[in-house]
Amino acid sequence: MHFCAEDVLDEFYKYDKDLPLNASESESLSAPDAASKEFHVTFDSARDQRVCSLLTLPEQALPPYPAVIILHGVFGHKSSPNQLKRSAHLVRAGYATLRIDAQYCGERQIPFINGASIHPRYYYRNRDAMIQTALDLMRAVDYLATRQDVDMRKVGFAGFSMGGAVGAIFSSYEERIKAVVLGITGGDFSKWKVSAPDGRALERMLQAYHLVDPIHYVRKISPRRLLMQNARNDIIISRDAAEALFNAALDPKQIIWYDCGHADMPDESLEDMRRFFDECLRPNT
């Protein structure tokens, strides 16, 4: 399949930078632990979308905080168990975290087919949701920039599965992100372990998703540091797909392999993520 012209790709990820956020914040009663404070935050994004998110602040640290934006996988949401674990681990280490719902996920669900908000058959709809979510992440950075308690010199991103694919796109354009973790994801969708009813359906799927294949974007994360975290027993992301994305990225980059499956990353991956952000965002602590 032909590589997309870079200037054409770029047009999908532009938005009006002075678009008002109209942010709304309310304290949540469900903070991950007693050492943190959590806020439910909504703000306006491009294309008349309203983004729902959770901002968690570390009460044991002094502001301004380093911060990490975290994005879930395709059938997850901002409060999925794995998202809570990732957030809590970073907050205990002194980071603020912002977890958004991708389009059609969590609070942004729209009943579509049999009550589900996302259906794998609608390739172009799903592709457009990935583009929208990349824009939503840029708006999440815009929101963090309005807060005096966040150190905008020390903002990172961590995305997993679909969130990693979208995150590679987002991070390639968003230079305010200083360090990037892409977990259990890969590039070249033809190498993903996906199924389609027939060969023609698979061809249509690959054609639709070509514009959002992270392999086209990941090299632009450099010179910022990239950490990939992948699973040796992943039933969705093949080793070939993970290595294709890693090989497309430029230095500085690192990949860590874990003896696990797609949905059961070990606790050591949390500590590896935390250590990576410490090295990148606050090397003198």
Image (cartoon, rainbow, N blue to C red):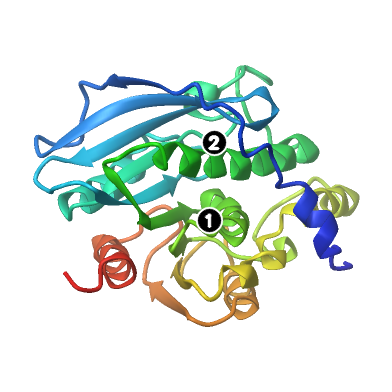
Give the number of the disc on residue 37. none
Q: Give the mark, 2 or 1, whose residue is nearer the N terminus.
A: 2
The spot of residue 163 in percent (x, y) is: 52, 49
Rendered position, 79 above or below 282: above
Instruction: Tell me if residue 209 can be seen.
Output: no
Which residue was labeled with disc 2?
A: 102
Give the number of the disc on residue 164. 1
User: What's under tag 2, amino acid-wise?
Assistant: Ala
Other-residue count near label 1 (Cα within 10 Å), few / some / many at <14 / 14–19 / ≥20: many
Residue 38 as seen in the image, left or right of residue 49: left
Quadrant location of residue 167? bottom right
The spot of residue 228 in percent (x, y) is: 46, 69
Q: Secondary structure at mark 2?
A: loop
Quadrant location of residue 7? bottom right
Residue 144 as seen in the image, left or right of residue 91: right
Along the line of sight, which residue is nearer the eye, 244 or 249? 249
Rendered position, 149 above or below 172: above
The spot of residue 215 in percent (x, y) is: 68, 67
Q: Residue at x 41, y 75 (%)?
A: 257
Along the line of sight, which residue is nearer the eye, 197 or 42? 42
Along the line of sight, which residue is nearer the eye, 75 or 197? 75
Q: Residue at x 13, y 48 (%)?
A: 62
Circles 2 and 1: CB atoms closer than 8 Å: no
Quadrant containing the N terminus in the rendered view: bottom right
User: What's under tag 1, amino acid-wise?
Assistant: Gly
The spot of residue 165 in percent (x, y) is: 59, 56
Q: Residue at x 69, y 39 (%)?
A: 15
Residue 221 as seen in the image, left or right of residue 62: right
